Amino acid sequence: MGNGVCSRRQRRIFQCLLLLTVVCGMMYGGMISYEMHKQLKRTEAMALKYQQHQESLSAQLQVVYEHRSRLEKSLQKERLEHKKAKEDYLVYKLEAQQSLNKEKNQHEDLKKQYYELHEQHQLQGEDHNRLLDEHKERYSKLEQTKEVEVSQLKGTHYNALQSVNAAAD
């Protein structure tokens, strides 16, 4: 133990332990490296799997988005058609109401004309009856006048015949 702190034998043991530690450390490092490499491969495989899954989801999402877009366009088209149908119905309803009002007005006008014509007919009937009565009265007077004239003529004719007969006798 003269020249150093440790003896040769101790140094050899120390060197063996150091070598053993280095070898164990290298083996341990190799195992850790191998495990990390394995873990990296598993992680890459999982990342690839998740990436494919994400791409699949992205494709599905794109299909859903396109389908939604088509549905929104279809819904918008249906809303426009519904709005147009509603407007057409309102126009139809308004025209029907106007037509009904027009027909009611025409009916009222025709009713009014009917009552006016009916009244005119009654007045004309009354005028006709009055004129008929006047004509009957005039006819009756003319007939009486004629009878008076005939009887006067008969009387004159009779008197003339008697004068002729008296003169002939």
Image: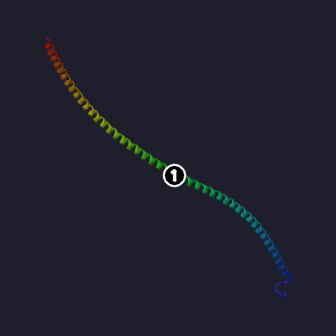
Which quadrant holds residue 19? bottom right
* Picture quarter with the C terminus: top left
Residue 105 lies, in percent from the top left, at 38, 44
In the image, is residue 56 above or below residue 28? above
Q: Is residue 73 left or right of residue 91?
A: right
Q: Amino acid at mark 1?
A: Lys
Q: Is residue 43 left or right of residue 96?
A: right
Residue 160 lies, in percent from the top left, at 16, 17
Residue at 56% over, 55% down: 76
In the image, is residue 47 above or below residue 4? above
Residue at 81% over, 76% down: 22
Which quadrant holds residue 152? top left
Q: Residue furthest bottom?
A: 3
Viewer-proximal residue, 124 or 4? 124
Residue 118 lies, in percent from the top left, at 32, 36
Q: Is residue 5 left or right of residue 104?
A: right
Viewer-proximal residue, 24 or 11? 24
Q: Residue furthest top?
A: 169
* Picture quarter with the N terminus: bottom right
- Residue carrying label 1: 84
Residue at 84% over, 79% down: 15
Residue 100 lies, in percent from the top left, at 41, 44
Viewer-proximal residue, 158 or 39? 158
